[in-house]
Image (cartoon, helix red, strand yellow):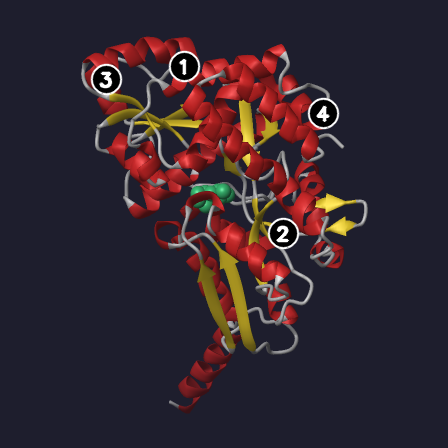
Amino acid sequence: MKKFITLCCACAAMLMLLTAPVASAKELSGKLEIFSWWAGDEGPALQALIDQYKAANPKVEVVNATVTGGSGVNAKAVLKTRMLGGEPPDSFQVHAGQELIGTWVKADRMEDLTFLFKEQGWEKVFPAGLVKQIGTDKGIWSVPVNIHRSNVVWYVPENLKKWGIAAPASWDEFFAAAEVLKAKGIVPLALAENWTINHLWESVALSAIGVENWEALWSGKLAFDSQAGVKAWQLFGKVLEYTNKDAASLSWQQATDMVVDGRAAFNIMGDWAAGYMTTTKKLVPGKDFGWAASPGTGGKFMFLADSFGLPKGAPNRDNVIAWLTLLGSREGSDAFNPLKGSISARTDSDLTKYNVYGQSAAADFSKDLIVGSLAHGVSANEGFMNDFASVMEMFLKSRDAMAAAKAAQQIAVKNGIGK
Ligand code: GAL
């Protein structure tokens, strides 16, 4: 009996060692405020990370501060007030690319995280192209937690079959299918509130002008009011004719619901829609819903990456460093992304943890031409994005492609695009 008890104690001790949270050398305590727009339906993936953090740092009180609103429409405004008011959250969601570099890094509000990248060996596990989007010659400014794809069209295979149409590979194919759908009283393309219109615009523009021109717009080599630029707005205007009239009052999830419920045939949305359909709605990818590159963008992967950084003056710096370390880890990333619909930003992720959608996105990311998203912070700074919203508003009223292209060129110059 005694032997047995000794053995049990030894086993228990071993188990404790094995399962003990991989804690930082010193035990962390106090608070950690994480600021993001991942509220409600968008929350489960973030919660998985927070659970891991809490297990490793039980004495830290995690404050999950969210401001609802897809693509951060409301959160970014609150963040701005806090940052400018000298009350930064400990860590906040920010897109890799110009949203980070052209806004918060430019304003000298972030701490350089090069030390953490070196310590964790991250320069070797994150793709060089991505590290470029979060770095400048002065440092590395955030930790990417995922790669999302923006140019995806979603549909329900069974419904398409019923309606006698296929997922369109080009906009011409879409227009042909859309006529069939309209005659049946089905909305061809579900659209939601304003930011999702910008989201649609980037997919349409990419297909209208191609990868080289898309890049050239952001490096300042191609004017927005060039022939290619005008073409993008013309095609966009035509696409809008096949969308629902109540778009402005819907959230992105409600537009996805229209497809799932069979009220609409297609929706173009980032692959957080895959996360919503699998994690929240418990649908089976490949069976209950299907996907393809948005029309005319096959072989192109328009990417964006959510990341978190360490603002200067963060109240709980050590707790943030532990948070960022978790975000960049293989374990953290592979807990978060399968729920989120995104793929890991790490090149060594465990794909067996992902469903067929995630696996196909990972395969595409490794072979497609990669371009940066405008609507989600990669290509342009916040100044341009804010002005672009007004250009879009004007276009929605006037449907004047030339005027929109000219206005876009003006705001590009004003916001230093390509400088
Ligand atoms: C994007 C963000 C995604 C998702 C989406 C909808 O900007 O990168 O993670 O949250 O907005 O809100």
Could you tell me how far apart the alpha carbons at marks 4 and 2 are, in whole angstroms? 28 Å
Q: Is tag 4's residue or tag 3's residue first in the polypeptide sequence?
A: 3
Residue 152 lies, with reference to residue 344, above or below; the image says above
Q: Residues within 10 Å of mark 3 (few under 14, many from 20)?
A: few
Q: Nearer the viewer, residue 99 or 390?
A: 390
**211 with respect to 4 (left or right):** right
Identified at 47% across, 43% down, the residue is 71
Quadrant of the drawing holding the N terminus: bottom left
Closer to viewer: mark 2 or mark 1: 1
Query: In this figure, which residue is indicated by the disc labeled 2?
Result: 143
Answer yes or no: do the residues labelled 1 and 4 have beta carbons within 8 Å?
no
- Graded by Cα atoms within 10 Å as few (under 14), some (14 to 19) or many (20 or more), the crowding at tag 4 reads some
Quick one: label 1 or label 3, which is nearer the N terminus? Answer: 3
Q: Amino acid at mark 3?
A: Lys
Q: Dot 4 corresponds to which residue?
A: 220
Find residue 184 and report its horizontal and vertical position in percent. Answer: 18, 15
**Residue under circle 3?**
161
- Whether residue 355 is visible, yes or no, is no
Q: Nearer the viewer, residue 145 or 225?
A: 225
Q: Give me the residue at 71% from left, 40% from top.
A: 132
The reply to whether dot 4 and dot 2 touch (C-beta < 8 Å) is no
Is label 2 in a helix, a strand or a loop? strand
Distance from label 3 to label 2 (Cα)? Answer: 43 Å
Q: What is the x, y in percent for residue 126? A: 65, 44
Looking at the rendered structure, which numbered label has been put on residue 238?
Answer: 1
Which disc, if any, is residue 201? none
